[in-house]
């Protein structure tokens, strides 16, 4: 009696799409493999988040506390002190939404950096991936989805605190603004994760960049409150071009792309121009890290 064991055939019937591809005699397309790899790596990041939900919980509780405490701190401020906002809480809502998305996107490089240090990234680089850029795409999708979730919670919390609620088109515009900002900042953070030697240096950059960019924007005060030099700095800050359109949505239900949302030192900025500037910021950020990604992921 022979002791040879015949290996069983792999079960491909239950795997979606593979049976049709094998019957057709072809391999999965490059795009299909890229999507599959990106979804698998994105799922891994969500599993990590599920195992450590404290990061998401803290990322939601902190901005809500900011909104509540800062709104209460300035609740007795004279009306009109912060433009046409009915309260400082309403004025602050846009800044909290944007700064939360910015902070989460700025931390996007940390998981990649830890994967580098623990050796998991090297395993991915030697794996037969269709494209190693799926590693970057997974991080982008994860951070953007997390930023949108945090923004939704802040919008609801602001509405409960009396800041009001934009209409359906306004909410869609807020989602688009958060997406563009998170996309650009995530790209820069991932570039830093591949360029810096370790997580200590990346955390140092995050700490140094966080608060100065907050105070050098219109998140906490309007441009008219600032000295001339700080007005110039604030209008060079991409955060301001995300904050002011969202703030305009809270104050005006009849907004349009031609609506003026900010009076910069060099002229008026419309809603559409702010969106174009955010789109340009995201495009420049993605383009600027391409040589670094090619060198690292090649």
Image: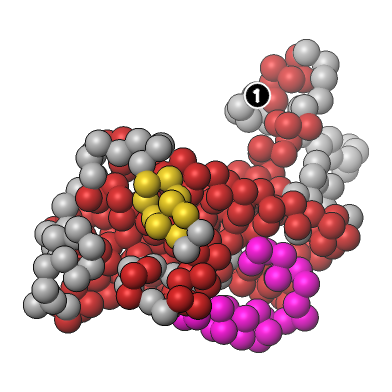
Q: Count the marks: how many?
A: 1
Residue 199: x %, y % from top left: 67, 81
Quarter containing the C terminus: bottom right
Comparing 113 with 102, the one in front is 102
Q: Name the residue carrying label 1.
A: 17
Q: Residue furthest top?
A: 24
Residue 191 versus residue 29 in the image, above or below: below
Q: Residue 122 occupies which quadrant of the picture?
A: bottom right
Mark 1 element type: loop
Q: Position of 107 compared to 263: left or right? A: right
Residue 80 visible in image: yes
- Residue at 70% across / 70% down in the picture? 193
Rate crowding at label 1 as few (under 14), some (14 to 19) or many (20 or more) other CA atoms within 10 Å.
few
Q: Residue 271 occupies which quadrant of the picture?
A: top left
Residue 39 versus residue 228 in the image, above or below: above
Which stretch appears magenta?
Answer: 188-213
Instruction: Kindly report the secondary structure that dominates the magenta region of the rendered protein.
Output: helix
Residue 172 visible in image: no
- Residue at 80% across / 58% down in the picture? 293
Comparing 70 with 38, the one in front is 70
- Residue at 66% across / 39% down in the picture? 36
Residue 113: x %, y % from top left: 68, 72
Residue 270 versus residue 114 in the image, above or below: above
């Amino acid at each position: 009696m022979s002791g040879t064991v015949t290996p069983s055939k792999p079960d491909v019937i239950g795997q979606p799409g593979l049976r049709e591809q094998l019957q057709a005699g072809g391999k999965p397309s490059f795009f299909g493999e890229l999507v599959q790899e990106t979804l698998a790596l994105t799922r891994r990041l969500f599993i990590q988040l599920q195992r450590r939900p404290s990061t998401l919980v803290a990322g939601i509780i902190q901005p809500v506390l900011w909104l509540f405490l800062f709104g209460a701190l300035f609740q007795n401020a004279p009306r009109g002190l912060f433009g046409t906002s009915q309260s400082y809480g309403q004025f602050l809502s846009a800044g909290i939404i944007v700064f939360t998305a910015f902070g989460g996107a700025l931390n996007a490089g940390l998981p990649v950096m830890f994967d580098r240090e623990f050796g998991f990234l090297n395993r991915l680089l030697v794996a037969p991936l269709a494209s190693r850029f799926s590693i970057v795409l997974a991080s982008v999708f994860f951070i953007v989805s997390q930023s949108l979730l945090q923004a939704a919670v802040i919008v609801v919390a602001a509405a409960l605190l009396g800041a009001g609620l934009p209409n359906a088109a306004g909410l869609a515009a807020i989602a688009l603004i958060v997406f563009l900002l998170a996309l650009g900042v995530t790209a820069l953070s991932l570039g830093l994760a591949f360029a810096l030697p370790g997580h200590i240096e990346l955390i140092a950059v995050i700490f140094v960049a966080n608060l100065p960019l907050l105070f050098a924007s219109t998140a906490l005060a309007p441009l008219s409150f600032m000295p001339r030099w700080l007005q110039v700095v604030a209008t060079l800050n991409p955060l301001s071009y995300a904050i002011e359109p969202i703030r305009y949505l809270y104050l005006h239900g009849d907004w349009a792309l031609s609506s003026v949302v900010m009076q910069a030192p060099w002229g008026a900025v419309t809603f559409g121009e702010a969106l174009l500037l955010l789109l340009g910021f995201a495009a420049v950020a993605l383009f600027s890290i391409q040589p670094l990604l090619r060198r690292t992921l090649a």
